Image (cartoon, grey):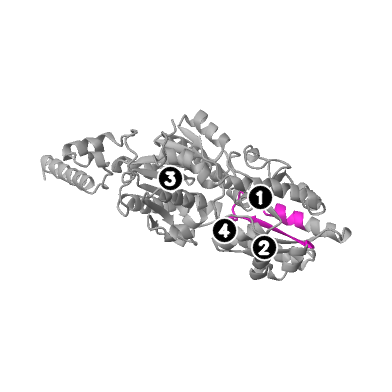
Amino acid sequence: MSLLDIALSVALCISTVITVFIVTLPSQFVPSGSRNNGPHEQELGRQNGPKYDNDTKNKDDSSVQVVVLGDIGHSPRMQYHAISIAKHGVKVQLIGYLESELHPDIVTNSLITVVSLPAAPKSLQTGSRLLFLLLGPLKVLWQVWSLYYALGYRTKPSKWMLVQNPPSIPTLAIAQIICYFRNTRLVIDWHNFGYSILALKLGNNHPLVKASEIYESFYSRSAAFNFAVTDVMAQKLRSQYNIKTETLHDRPPQHFQPLTPEERIAFLTRLPETAKHAHEIVTGSRKLIVSATSWTVDEDFSILLDALVAYSTEVDHLPQLPKILAIITGKGPRKEPYLSKIQQLEKDGCLTNVSVLTAWLTPGDYATLLGAADLGISLHTSSSGVDLPMKVVDMFGTGLPVVGWSKFLAWPELVKEDINGKGFGSVAELQSLLGSLFSNPDRLKRLRDGALQECNHRWDDEWNPVAGRLFHLVDDQPPK
């Protein structure tokens, strides 16, 4: 075979690959005002990428894809986004993993379509740092294909794509590619920084952490706009990444509500985890504390367990102090080791005045549990220092005061010291707070009164002026 024949064969193969690639490109979103354009104009649109103009408030054009590269049921903020968008009569495609129960308003809303992503094989999941370096890239390749296929071919083209970050790898890169091909506007909802979470596993100076930070910074610039969960995070994004960002604080949705005394008694009597102690909780001889967690590395539950052991000993010497029922809700990778530790503490007689239970509740029962509790506990330590635990917002929605780990920059944005909660930075400080609050009913009531004030400002009150404006769903111009 001559060199000319080889060159022609290679050229034919390349031409075939390019043709197949172009023919199989994901379909584009075409605004109603442009749907009569001919193929020449549409091809120009594809070549030039998406156009970001202030074109229309026509809700037929305002379809939105909400993307979570994680369990949708464990992503309440993204579910609230979808619900708020649908309230304005706009169709939503909610894309993510289906591993737990969804919010009832997601399931029953005909405007919301849930598109499930296939879970990665269990063989690619590990808690080992060494195996993570080997299996991590393979898992990313799996996620790349499943996410690309879902966003490009299993869903209809939308005007907007709202993406949760983290995880940033590979979400941001795939989202940018799909938005370019489909003429879609990308909006990133920053819950934290992906590289800071990776640093918890690998250390701040690991090359992969540094590469992840560069990646996150680079791809964030492709977004038309960004939301941040705190003011300090928004400031960091504007100053370090130079991207358009507005704060969209977490606020409790309507199903988190305070309980009447009658509702509280009925729930405590019904719930299996509290039924045994319902009378003690109602009379105040035992206090109900609640902590929600995903059992991840950014929450150290040994702090709470050590404080409860110390409190139990304190009750032996001060019998006027109430006993405690502590309920820890949630699922996650580090749950089993802590369950073993709790069992060992009980076996050793270290928790004679404290009962520690774990529970996995429906969204409705979880909201009611918070309303029935005496005190909420947050152990979120913040890998970046600029994010906040949404669980505290939920607690405030029911009028539940909170004590939480406060040694990070964003904490004062959420908890007002001595008004709706208290912060701590050690086991001793948490034990001291439990003792002082439970021995002084007036002090605890003052915090509860402050938490009840937080009930007046809900998710839609925060969402409409920020996200509603951006998506052209309310009568105002989008953020600049």
Q: Residues under labels 2 and 3: Cα distance?
A: 38 Å
In the rendering, which numbered label is found on residue 252? none
Q: Is residue 166 left or right of residue 203?
A: left
Crowding around mark 2 (Cα neighbors within 10 Å: few <14, some 14 to 19, many 20+) is some
Q: Residues under labels 1 and 4: Cα distance?
A: 15 Å
The residue indicated by pointer 3 is 163
Identify the image quadrant of residue 312.
Answer: bottom right
Residue 286 in the magenta stretch? The answer is yes
Q: Position of residue 177 (x, y in %)?
A: 34, 42
The residue indicated by pointer 1 is 379
Which one is closest to the eye, mark 3 or mark 4?
3
The residue indicated by pointer 4 is 332
Element on which disc 3 rests: strand
Residue 169 visible at all: no
In the image, residue 439 above or below residue 180: below
- What's drawn in magenta, residue-wise? 284-308
Label located before the other in sequence (3 or 4):
3
Label located before the other in sequence (2 or 3):
3
Mark 2 in CB contact with mark 1 (< 8 angstroms): no
Task: From the viewer's side, name the closer residue of 127 and 446.
Answer: 446
Q: Residues under labels 2 and 4: Cα distance?
A: 28 Å
Label located before the other in sequence (1 or 3):
3
Mark 3 in CB contact with mark 4 (< 8 angstroms): no
Label located before the other in sequence (2 or 4):
2
Residue type at tag 1: Leu
